[in-house]
Image: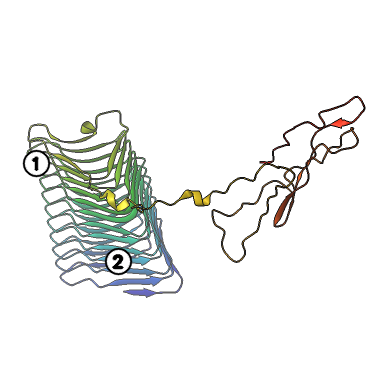
């Protein structure tokens, strides 16, 4: 079935597109092309296999937005028999899954679940308790993979992305590739898990930066016989966590490994990065961290086991800044309650300091060439200071600098003595290209009885 329109498609109140195969035949492809698609008030799209036949696949190609909103509203590709589940692929500018809306690929029988691929030019928003994007298996079939490509991803208000196994089949992998930021907050989760004998799926995330806040977390887990999956984070800038968690855990099987590569820093506030095994002889997962530096504030980095060996922690960083108030060996710890403890290794890469050293010349510069003798004090009314500007070249340290004084060095005009009208002071007048000193008249220091002025040796005012 193919639906093509240049406008919008809206499915509400149980109006749906459905393709079901109940025999040995293979279900057909359901393809929808439109500007936007809205599934609300229990509107849904489903392909399903009930027997040996494979379920059909679903392809949605939208120029703008796909909205899946409300309980019972969603898109499902599943199998309940031995047939393979259908694949589900969505291409759009943005995708919004809110208020218990869902997108699922699933296997309930022997057949493998189909893969779920989301390719978005802008943003994927999953919001609200019960809102979910899921690839899972409940039978012996393998779970499908969940792959997301987008500019940014926001999980808020207890929403989730998951790849899970609830039976004998192995869970699929969960891969998220983003050009910008991954935000997980408000008790939301990205999780790959197994609750049966199947192996847990792996989680791989690539993004520019990762923010885990308000109880947001990323994890792989096993509560059955299967081993927990591995968790790999490759970030272009930073990892910031506040009341967040990155965790692999197993009840009795082996815990998964954690590998995080960040070129800048980890900043953990009231958060944790852990691998753990709760009981049995399963080994704790190993941890490899490669940030530029780590800031721990009320946070822990722990690899622990119960009866098996504890996981190892290998950290390559230029520094660890511990603000927890506890010794660093307690907040970064690899241990086993009854088994052999793991090992914590912190590698600080050697740096060639000579690369940052500037070799000075053997002959030092003679600073005296930049110094000029100060102008002499006015002597016998003959001293003068002449400034000749350089023309046609850039200024150098030896050039005269312009004064900040406006107009004249001294704005006070010359005073006139009452004794025969002689001037008692002087000033320096500044003209373009030349500074001249006007005559400075000696101060009268007394007079004789016959009324003649007597000049004594008086040092004239100093200008410099």
Tag shown at residue 282: 1
Quadrant housing the C terminus: top right
Q: How many marks?
A: 2
Q: What colouring style does the render use?
A: rainbow
Task: Classify residue 371 as left or right of residue 1.
Answer: right
Q: Secondary structure at mark 2?
A: strand
Tell me where residue 209 appears, x and y as whole percent.
35, 52
Quarter of the image where one finds residue 462: top right
Tell me where residue 24 appears, x and y as whole percent.
15, 70
Label 1 crowding class (10 Å Cα cut-off): few <14, some 14-19, many 20+? many
Quadrant housing the N terminus: bottom left
Q: Earlier in the sequence, mark 1 or mark 2?
A: 2
Which residue bears the numbered disc 2?
A: 89
Quarter of the image where one finds residue 58: bottom left
Quick one: which residue is furthest to the top in this view? 449
Tell me where residue 7 appears, x and y as whole percent.
46, 71
Disc 1 and disc 2 in contact, CB within 8 angstroms: no
Tell me where residue 388 appears, x and y as whole percent.
65, 58
Question: Where is 335 relative to 175, above or below?
Answer: above
The foreground one among 157 and 432 is: 432
Name the front one of labels 1 and 2.
1
- Residue 278 appears anywhere in the view: yes
- Residue 131 appears anywhere in the view: no
Tag shown at residue 396: none
The foreground one among 29 and 431 is: 431
């Amino acid at each position: 079935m193919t639906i093509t329109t240049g406008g919008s498609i809206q499915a509400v109140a149980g109006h749906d597109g459905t393709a079901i195969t109940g025999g040995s035949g293979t279900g057909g492809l359901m393809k929808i092309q439109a500007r936007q698609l809205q599934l609300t008030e229990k509107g849904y799209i489903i392909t399903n296999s009930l027997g040996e036949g494979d379920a059909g696949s679903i392809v949605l190609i939208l120029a703008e937005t796909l909205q899946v909103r409300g309980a019972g509203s969603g898109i499902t590709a599943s199998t309940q028999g031995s047939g393979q589940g259908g694949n589900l692929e969505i291409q759009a500018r943005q995708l919004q899954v809110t208020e218990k809306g869902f997108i699922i690929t699933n296997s309930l029988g022997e057949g493998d679940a189909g893969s779920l691929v989301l390719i978005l030019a802008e943003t994927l928003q999953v919001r609200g308790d019960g809102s979910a994007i899921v690839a899972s298996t409940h039978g012996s079939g393998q779970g499908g993979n969940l792959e997301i490509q987008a500019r940014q991803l926001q999980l808020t208000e207890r929403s989730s992305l998951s790849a899970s196994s609830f039976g004998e089949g192995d869970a699929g992998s969960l891969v998220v590739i983003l050009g910008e930021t991954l935000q997980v907050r408000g008790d939301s989760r990205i999780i790959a898990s197994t609750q049966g004998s199947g192996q847990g799926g792996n989680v791989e995330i690539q993004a520019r930066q990762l923010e885990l806040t308000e109880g947001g977390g990323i994890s792989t887990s096993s509560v059955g016989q299967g081993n927990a999956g591995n968790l790999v984070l490759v970030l272009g800038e930073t990892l910031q966590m506040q009341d967040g968690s990155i965790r692999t855990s197993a009840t009795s099987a082996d815990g998964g490994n954690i590998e995080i590569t960040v070129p800048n820093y980890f900043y953990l506030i009231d958060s944790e990065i852990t691998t753990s095994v709760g009981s049995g002889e399963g080994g704790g997962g190993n941890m490899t961290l490669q940030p530029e530096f780590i800031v721990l504030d009320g946070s822990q980095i722990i690899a622990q086991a119960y009866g098996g060996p504890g996981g190892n922690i290998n950290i390559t960083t230029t520094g660890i800044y511990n603000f927890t108030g506890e010794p660093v060996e307690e907040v970064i710890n690899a241990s086993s309650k009854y088994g052999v403890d793991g090992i914590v290794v912190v590698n600080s890469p050697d740096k060639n300091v000579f690369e940052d050293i500037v070799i000075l010349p053997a002959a030092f510069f003679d600073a005296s060439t930049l110094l000029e003798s100060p102008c002499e004090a006015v002597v016998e009314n003959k001293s003068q200071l002449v400034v000749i500007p350089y023309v046609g070249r850039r200024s150098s340290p030896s050039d005269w600098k312009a004064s900040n004084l406006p107009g004249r060095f001294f704005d006070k005009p010359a005073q006139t003595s009452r004794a025969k009208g002689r001037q008692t002071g002087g000033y320096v007048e500044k003209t373009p290209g030349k500074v001249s000193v006007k005559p400075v008249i000696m101060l009268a220091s007394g007079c004789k009885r016959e009324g003649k002025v007597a000049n004594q040796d008086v040092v004239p005012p100093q200008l410099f």
